[in-house]
Amino acid sequence: MLRRKPTRLELKLDDTEEFESVKKELESRKKQRDEVDVVGVATSSEMSGASGAVMDGKTREQMIHERIGYKPHPKPNTLPSLFGNLQF
């Protein structure tokens, strides 16, 4: 295997300025997202009102199901659904 000389990397002023601008943009997006999350939590807690303990668990479960795309549909326990279309 051939050994080559190490590559020299140079950091230019333009590179640092670009990095700082991208970093500030990402921080501002994160701050906006956090503000929206805080406002969303406040409005959902206001909507739950006095029945918060019982309804909150159910709505939380529904929110999780919506987020992951889970839609529970129980299957009926009839003979065709259990055994399929069996013909004798």
Image (cartoon, rainbow, N blue to C red):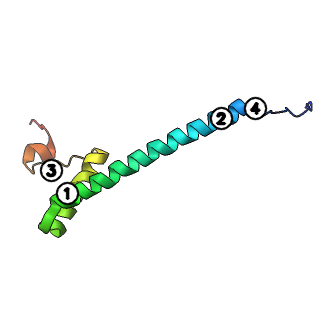
Tag 2: Cα neighbours inside 10 Å, few (<14), some, or many (≥20)?
A: few
Query: What residue did someone put label 1 on?
Result: 59
Quadrant that contains the C terminus? top left
Query: What residue did someone put label 4 on?
Result: 12
What label sits on residue 17 in the rendered view? 2
Residue flagged by tag 4: what amino acid is it? Answer: Lys
| Left or right of residue 23, residue 76 in this image | left
Q: Nearer the viewer, residue 11 or 54?
A: 11
Q: Describe the element under mark 4 as helix, strand or loop.
A: loop
Tag 1: Cα neighbours inside 10 Å, few (<14), some, or many (≥20)?
A: some
The residue positioned 12% from the left and 68% from the top of the image is 50
What label sits on residue 74 in the rendered view? 3
Q: Which one is closest to the eye, mark 3 or mark 2?
A: 2
State which tag comes first along the sequence, 1 or 4. Answer: 4
State which tag comes first along the sequence, 2 or 4. Answer: 4
Residue flagged by tag 1: what amino acid is it? Answer: Thr
State which tag comes first along the sequence, 1 or 2. Answer: 2
Residue 26 visible in this rendered orientation of the protein: yes
